[in-house]
Amino acid sequence: HSFCTLLVDPVRMWLIILAGVLWGVTNPLLKRFTQGFAAKTSDDDEAGLPGAPVAPPPQQQQGLLADLKFLCSRPKYLITQGLNLLGSVAFTVGMGEASLSVGPAVANGLAMAVTCAMSTLVLKEEPMAPRTAFGVGLIFAGLLLCVTAGS
């Protein structure tokens, strides 16, 4: 038995992988389908995250109902958000008795790699730097080793 399969049974591992793929595919789509939601972005918000949405000044705030109307009027956003939430359900079920040292690492690493690939190859957002492409390849190789080592 391998390290990964000792810590996570195969069905749960596939649910964790499904979660990572769903998150990775839906993250850039959610970004695209919410364009126009925030009137402007800042370079840094309170948490220090670059490009995070900034609340508009009080005179421009339309309230929670206007925000919900904006998002609910976008079927592509709703479908994508539903798939993202399905990934969260798959992750929760997959983590059942799984080790906290393997499950989140696989899901989050895979989500990051799929997000990079999806943004670059499918959505054509910005070209992937060679170092990023190499890192994505290493993530996929590690995941492949982790998943197939026990079979």
Image (tube, rainbow, N blue to C red):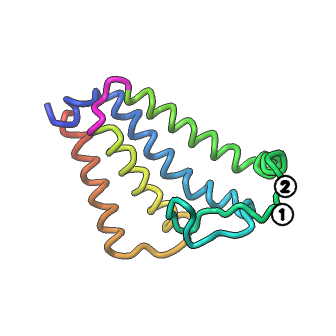
Is-magenta flag for residue 91?
no
Which amino acid, mark 2? Gln
- Magenta segment's dominant SS is loop
Q: CA distance from mark 1 to mark 2?
A: 6 Å
Q: Compare residues 121 and 45 and report the one nearer the observer.
A: 45
Rendered location of residue 77, percent (x, y): 69, 50
Vertical placement of 41 versus 99: above or below?
below
The residue drawn where x is 43% and y is 51% is: 111
| CA neighbours of label 1 inside 10 A, class few (<14), some (14 to 19), many (20+) | few
- The location of residue 48, given as percent across then percent down, is 50, 64
Residue 60 is tagged as: 1
Element under label 1?
A: helix
How many marks on residues? Answer: 2
Residue at which label 2 appears: 62
- Which of the 4 image quadrants contains residue 44? bottom right
Residue 98: percent from left, percent from top: 31, 29
Query: What element does badge 2 sit on?
Result: loop
What label sits on residue 80 in the rendered view?
Answer: none
- Determine the image quadrant of residue 135: bottom left
In the displayed structure image, the side of residue 121 where residue 142 appears, left or right: left
Query: Looking at the rendering, in which quadrant would you find the C terminus?
Result: top left
Q: Are marks 1 and 2 in contact (CB under 8 Å)?
A: yes
Q: Which residues are magenta?
A: 96-101
